[in-house]
Image: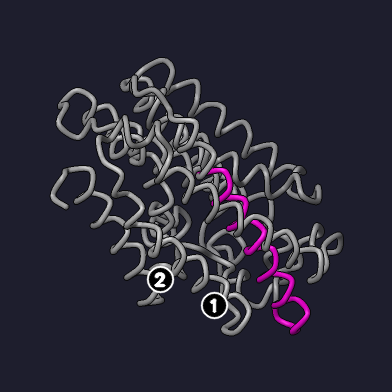
C-alpha cells in the first residue's frame, strides 16, 4: 500500500511533459550520435525524477489546502496515506537521484536541473500566489527542459525553438488558470489564492495573445531562411496544420468541455489532440529525414 501511494505521489503520468527535453535531439539532427543520445536519455531521466520530487514537495506544502478540496483530499499526503516525514525523504531522494543523473550527462545539465529545482521550490513556497508571474514560472520550467536537452548536451539551442517553446508553454499556463477559474466558479474547483487576481475576461485575452503567438512563431519558423538552411528543406510548413488543429482543439476543450486544466491528461484522453500531436511528430520526422 505504501509503495502504491509513493508511486501516486510521484505522478509518473506527468513525465510526458519531460518530452520537451527531446526537442533539441530532433531539430538538432543529433539522433544518430550515440554519446548525445545517451546524454539526452540521462537528462530526460533526471527531469523525470526531479519533477516528481517537485510534485511531492508541492503536495507537502499544500497538504492543508488539499484536505479541503473535494478531489485533492485523496492525494497521499493530504489523506495520510504517506506520512510527512516519509514524503520529505522521498522528495529528497528523488531530487538527489535526478541531480546525480544530470551530473552524469554534463555539468551544464546539472546547473540547469538544479535551477529547475530551486525555481520550483520558490514557486511552491509562495511565488505561485503572484499573478502572471506564476504562469511564467511554469513556462520557465519547460524552457529549462529545452535548454537541458540542447545546451546541456552540447546542442546549440535555436532561437526559433526557444521562442516557439516559450509561446506554447505560456499559452498552456494561462489555459490552465482559465480552467481552474472556471471550475472554481462552478463550485468544485481549486482554491488557489492567485485565482482571486484573475478574471475570465483577462485570461481569455492572455490566452488569445499567446495562442496567436504559438501559431505565428511556429509558422515563421517553418519558412525562415535559417530553418531551410539548417534542415535542408522548406517542407516543415507541412506540419503547420497539425499545430493549428492542436491549438484550436485545446481551446475547444477549454471552453466547451471544461478541459485545459492538465495538458498531460488532455493529451492522453482526447483522441483528436493525441492524433494531432502524433501526426505532427510523424510528419516532422519524415520531413527532417527527407522522406517527404
Q: Tell me which residue sits at (46%, 65%) in the image.
A: 244
* Farthest right residue in view: 197
According to the image, label 2 marks what residue?
A: 273
* Residue 289, quarter of the rendered image: top left
Relative horizontal placement of residue 280, taking residue 79 as reference (left or right): left
Give the magenta-colored segment's residue range.
165-188
Is 181 magenta? The answer is yes
Q: How is the image coloured?
A: one colour
Asked which quadrant contains residue 152, the reply is top left
44 or 34, nearer to the observer: 34
Q: Residue tagged by mark 1?
A: 253
Give the Cα distance between marks 1 and 2: 10 Å
Residue 186 included in the magenta stretch of the image: yes
The secondary element bearing badge 1 is classed as helix
| Of pointers 1 and 2, the one earlier in the residue sequence | 1
Between residue 71 and residue 131, name the one nearer to us: 131
Residue 96 appearing in the image: no
At horizontal 44% and vertical 69% (from top left) the residue drawn is: 245
SS assignment at label 2: helix
Amino acid at each position: 500500500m505504501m509503495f502504491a501511494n509513493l508511486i501516486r505521489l510521484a505522478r509518473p503520468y506527468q513525465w510526458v511533459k519531460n518530452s520537451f527535453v527531446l526537442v533539441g535531439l530532433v531539430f538538432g539532427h543529433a539522433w544518430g550520435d550515440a554519446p548525445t543520445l545517451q546524454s539526452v536519455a540521462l537528462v530526460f531521466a533526471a527531469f523525470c525524477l526531479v519533477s516528481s520530487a517537485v510534485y511531492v514537495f508541492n503536495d507537502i506544502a499544500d497538504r492543508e489546502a488539499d484536505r479541503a478540496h473535494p478531489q485533492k483530499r485523496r492525494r497521499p499526503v493530504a489523506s495520510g496515506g504517506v506520512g510527512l516525514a516519509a514524503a520529505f525523504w522521498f522528495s529528497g531522494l528523488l531530487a538527489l537521484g535526478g541531480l546525480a543523473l544530470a551530473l552524469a550527462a554534463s555539468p551544464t545539465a546539472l546547473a540547469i536541473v538544479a535551477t529547475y529545482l530551486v525555481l520550483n521550490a520558490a514557486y511552491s513556497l509562495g511565488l505561485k500566489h503572484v499573478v502572471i508571474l506564476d504562469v511564467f514560472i511554469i513556462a520557465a520550467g519547460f524552457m529549462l527542459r529545452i535548454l537541458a536537452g540542447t545546451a546541456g548536451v552540447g546542442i546549440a539551442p535555436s532561437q526559433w525553438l526557444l521562442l516557439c517553446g516559450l509561446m506554447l508553454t505560456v499559452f498552456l499556463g494561462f489555459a490552465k488558470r482559465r480552467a481552474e477559474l472556471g471550475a472554481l466558479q462552478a463550485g468544485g474547483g481549486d482554491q488557489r489564492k492567485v485565482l482571486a487576481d484573475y478574471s475570465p475576461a483577462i485570461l481569455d485575452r492572455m490566452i488569445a495573445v499567446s495562442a496567436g503567438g504559438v501559431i505565428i512563431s511556429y509558422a515563421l519558423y517553418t519558412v525562415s531562411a535559417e530553418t531551410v538552411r539548417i534542415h535542408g528543406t522548406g517542407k516543415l510548413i507541412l506540419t503547420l496544420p497539425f499545430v493549428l488543429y492542436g491549438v484550436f482543439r485545446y481551446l475547444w476543450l477549454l471552453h466547451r468541455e471544461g478541459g485545459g486544466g492538465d495538458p498531460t491528461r488532455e493529451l492522453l484522453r482526447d483522441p483528436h489532440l493525441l492524433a494531432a500531436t502524433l501526426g505532427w511528430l510523424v510528419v516532422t520526422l519524415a520531413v527532417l529525414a527527407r522522406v517527404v
